[in-house]
Amino acid sequence: MKRSIIMVYPRQGFSGLYVRHMPLSLLYASIEVVKAGYDVKIFDQRLYGDDWQSHLHAMIGPDILAVGISVMSGAPIEHARLIGRFVKSVDASINVIWGGPHANFYPDTILQDEASCDYVVSGYASVIFNELIEAIAAGTPPEGIRGISWRRPDGGIEVNVANDTSFEFVDYREIPYHLIPDFTAYGQLDDGKIIFSMYSAVGCPYQCTFCSSPAQYSRL
């Protein structure tokens, strides 16, 4: 049985030119699959130049069950598309899963517009991502798993929006920081200091119209 997962963080466009934080979204989403015994590796596209494909290709082996991509709206969408298509060109049997802020609000659009995407995870992802991975490993459709949308074998799209509005508690001691192979890659790019990200709160009190946070965390 395939037991390996690659978690991918795409390039961020202009917002990632000066400060590069570690991909915490991937760490949070990986908590339960790591606890379940899956072999998880992180691929941060921001760390590579135009030859990123060769580095990702080197990570793709016969034991890869799925590739998860954390996608923000804007420039990362196109990078996520290219990543998914590249993965499928290497091995079409690998399941490509989108998550992140963009996936929270547009699961149906993602599946309609991007053929390389097989599943979309909306909402808090640690628990339901593990449930999805277990369903994929068992060869069963993710029916009944909240927040999972997917493409059926006949090409139809099933959308199961997140219906659990409760906060997903994350124990900081379970965050798999060991998945980051090199912390020196993260920091302010014109400074030699390393940034180690650790957040003690969820959501944001501000109402910036360009951000997904007000809609996502309005209930907290």
Image (spheres, grey):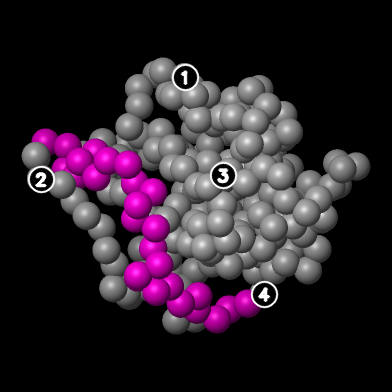
User: Between marks 1 and 4, how big is the CA–CA gap?
Assistant: 39 Å
The label nearer to you, 4 versus 2, is 2
User: Between marks 3 and 4, how big is the CA–CA gap?
Assistant: 26 Å
Q: Which residue is mark 2?
A: 193
User: Between marks 3 and 2, how big is the CA–CA gap?
Assistant: 31 Å
Image position of 57 (left or right of 96): left
* Quadrant the N terminus occupies: top right
**Rendered location of residue 177, percent (x, y):** 34, 55
Mark before the other along the chain sequence, 1 or 4 = 1
Q: Which residue is mark 4?
A: 163
**Rendered location of residue 88, percent (x, y):** 66, 28
Q: Are marks 3 and 4 in contact (CB under 8 Å)?
A: no
**Rendered location of residue 37, percent (x, y):** 56, 56
As rendered, which of 23 and 104 lies closer to the eye?
23
Residue with the most extreme left position: 192
Q: Quadrant of residue 61?
A: top right
Q: Which residue is mark 1?
A: 54
70 in relation to 63, above or below:
below
Image position of 113 (left or right of 125): right
Secondary structure type for disc 4: loop
Identified by mark 3, the residue type is: Ile
Around disc 4, counting alpha carbons within 10 Å, would you say few (fewer than 14), some (14 to 19), or many (20 or more)? Answer: few
Q: Quadrant of residue 19?
A: top left
**Res. 179 in view:** yes
Q: Which mark is residue 5?
A: 3
Image position of 30 (left or right of 95): left
83 in relation to 137, above or below:
above
Secondary structure type for disc 3: strand
The verdict on residue 182 being magenta is: yes
The label nearer to you, 1 versus 3, is 3
**Highlighted magenta segment, given as a residue range:** 164-190
